[in-house]
Image: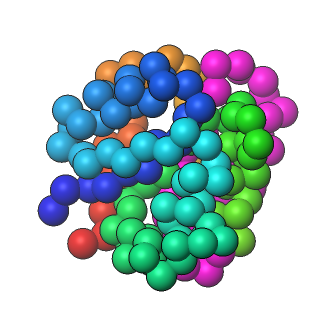
Amino acid sequence: MKCLLAAVDDNLIDRKLVERLLKNSSCKVTTAENGLRALEYLGLGDEKRTALEDNVSKVNLIITDYCMPGMTGYELLKKIKESSSLKEIPVVIMSSENIPTRINKCLEEGAQMFMLKPLKQSDVAKLRCNLMNCRS
C-alpha cells in the first residue's frame, strides 16, 4: 500500500519540493497551502466534514511548515493532537529558521520531528523511517 502524506506550506516552491522528494519514495502526496485547508482536508474544517472524513484514516504523515499566515504549523499541530481521530498521525514540522525554543515547543506538543528547510533527500530517508509504521 502506498503511504499518503499531507504536505502543508504556504510557499508553492517548498510544497512542490516536498511533493517531488516524497513522490520518489512511493508516497502519494496531498498538498494544502495553509493550516485551515489542511484541517478541512482532514475533516476538522467547518464545512465538507462528511465528504472528507475518509481521508483521515488514510493519512500516514502530516508535514507542515511552521511559519504560515492565518495559522502557524504549531497551531495546526495542536489542533491535530487535540483531535481524537487525528492525534495518532505523526506530524513533522519544517522551518527555515533554526530556533531551539520553537523546535522544543513543537516537540513537546507532540511533533514527531522538526526539520530545517529546504528539505534534502537525506531528510526523506528520516521520514521514511516514520512511514515504516504505515497503517494499512
Location of the C terminus (image quadrant)? bottom left
- Please name the residue shown 76% across and 51% down the image: 75
- Please name the residue shown 49% across and 51% down the image: 62
State whether residue 123 appears in this view.
Answer: no
Residue 82 screen position, x and y as percent: 71, 71
Q: Is residue 32 left or right of residue 23?
A: right
- Between 132 and 72, the one nearer to me in the picture: 72
Residue 136 versus residue 1 in the image, above or below:
below
Residue 46 screen position, x and y as percent: 66, 71
* Residue numbers of the magenta segment: 83-110
State whether residue 70 appears in this view.
Answer: yes
Residue 1 screen position, x and y as percent: 15, 62
Q: Is residue 136 left or right of residue 85?
A: left
- Please name the residue shown 70% across and 34% down the image: 68
Residue 126 screen position, x and y as percent: 39, 36
- Is residue 26 inside the magenta stretch? no
Q: How many marks?
A: 0
- Please name the residue shown 32% across and 45% down the image: 29
- Specify the quadrant of the image occupied by residue 123: top left
- Specify the quadrant of the image occupied by residue 19: top left
- Give the color scheme: rainbow, by chain, secondary structure or one colour: rainbow
Residue 52 versus residue 128 in the image, above or below:
below
Query: Residue furthest toward the front?
Result: 47
- Between 121 and 52, the one nearer to me in the picture: 52
